[in-house]
Image (cartoon, grey):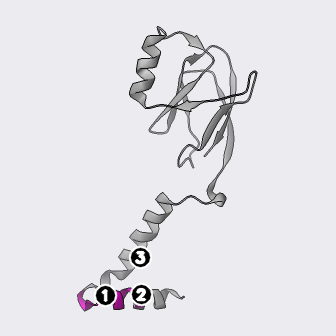
Amino acid sequence: MTYAELKTNIANYLNRSDLTSEIDIFIDNTEAELNRRLRVADMIKRATATAENQYLSLPTDWLEAINIEITSNDFRPLMQMSIESLDVYRKSINNKNGQPIYYAIVDNTLELAPIPDASYTLQLTY
């Protein structure tokens, strides 16, 4: 199907001539929404990062977390929590440092808990 055929099909479906000029915007918005929601194998990426602090900047092309794991020392997948749950956990351990177990994502930052007590290599699948 060509773009012109798509526009014709949408116009026929709408059955409203007053919306014909809006079809390009409708297609653009639909494409953008589908790109935000759909994930296909070609979109999945891997990166490594070094966790030495409580906060870690995420890659600029980050969309969403699929898996985050520690690959140095003892292999361990990290579990995602809400930022509120992470704060409750941190308080329950008196904010002690240790090997990270949990993470939360705020803006373009990964927050780890406990705060790393050493340098850990993370594999980020996103």
> CB under 8 Å between callouts 1 and 2?
no
Q: Earlier in the sequence, mark 2 or mark 3?
A: 2
- Identify the magenta region: 9-18
Question: Is residue 111 depicted above or below 23 in this figure?
Answer: above
User: What amino acid is at disc 3?
Assistant: Ile
Q: Earlier in the sequence, mark 1 or mark 2?
A: 2
Instruction: Calculate the distance from the C-alpha at mark 3 to the C-alpha at mark 1.
Output: 12 Å
* Residue 14 x/y as whole percent: 30, 86
Choose between 112 and 59: the one closer to the eye: 112
Q: Which residue is mark 2?
A: 7
- Dot 3 falls on a residue whose secondary structure is helix
Q: Earlier in the sequence, mark 3 or mark 1?
A: 1
**Residue name at image x 63 percent, y 21 percent:** 52
> CB under 8 Å between callouts 2 and 3?
yes
**Residue name at image x 46 percent, y 16 percent:** 90
Question: Is residue 50 depicted above or below 64 in this figure?
Answer: above
- Dot 1 falls on a residue whose secondary structure is helix
Is 31 part of what is drawn in magenta? no
Q: Which residue is mark 1?
A: 20
Position of 3 compared to 116: left or right?
left
Q: Which residue is mark 3?
A: 27
